[in-house]
Image (tube, rainbow, N blue to C red):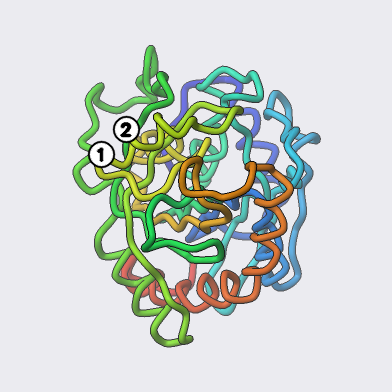
Amino acid sequence: MLETHDPEIRQIVQQVETKIQEIPLIGFILGSGLGEFAEEVKNPIIMPTSSLPDYPRSTVSGHAGKLVAGRIGEVSVMIVQGRVHYYEGYPISKVVYPVRLLAALGAQALIVTNAAGGMGEEFQPGDLMAITDQVNLMGVNPLVGQSWGFETFPDMTDAYNPKLRQALHRAAKSVNVILKEGVLGGWMGPSYETATEVRLLKMVGVSAACMSTIPEVIAAARLRLRLAGISCITNMATGFSTTPLTHEEVKVTAAKVQVKFRTLLKAAIPEIAAIIGHSER
């Protein structure tokens, strides 16, 4: 378990520890409209985040605001069913509370997921994309003024762990799910990007854009969590879309891909557990 000197996050950790039955091996953060994966947990322990002291509340439709702990197969997991976003008005230090909580509880790996807007003909709404790298255009970094007991300058070279990404691809192949790859760009939001901004992102190699995830990945790198990421392409970004963008479209598309999304993640769990080195805690 990682030591935390922040009294606020320590209080959250202590309260969660009184409720869970075992240390989660793998943590999941689920994006907009993707929360149904939590239904895969056997005999779940469900904790509304509203019951945790100082934990930021999810205010966006499609984010349930719950922690779900238990097992999927033989692997202990904790699922953050709905994240919070910087655009909701929270300090960036609180946006990454879920990552800090999972690390403090002893999780060895983290899977982050999101809804994202695809850029280019290689993507269509409903595609799943393994994230290979990221571009932070949010204008903030969760490590500013923070140490958490680690060095100031974490290396981001393999923030998206190559072995875990390979595990996602093996799992996808085993269940006949097409999993593409690409670079994720993070935008502050809540407004969608303009067509010109999308062209700029495309020029620097971004494949899909979201309004989350980026700070969580930076925090995970600082906390030395092995991490993989999946974007659900729920819409085409401005300039590639033929219709106005809406959050409702995001939720509708996410709902349509729930089955293959859940199938992929469930298949990936034993693959990731094997990489970590053990399947049970």
Q: Name the residue under label 2.
A: 200
- Residue 71, by quadrant, is bottom right
Q: Mark 1 points at which residue?
A: 203
Judged left or right of residue 66, residue 280 is left
Give x and y (percent) for residue 205. 26, 44
Give x and y (percent) for residue 257. 62, 69
Residue at image location 55% in from the left, 61% down from the top: 125
Q: Which amino acid does label 2 sit on?
A: Leu
Residue at image location 61% in from the left, 22% down from the top: 8
Asked whether 279 or 183 is in front, the reply is 183
**Element type where label 1 sits in the image:** helix
Q: Is residue 53 above or below residue 155?
A: above
Q: What residue type is labelled 1?
A: Met
Which residue is farthest front?
242
**Element type where label 2 sits in the image:** helix
Circles 1, 2 touching at the beta carbon (< 8 Å)? yes
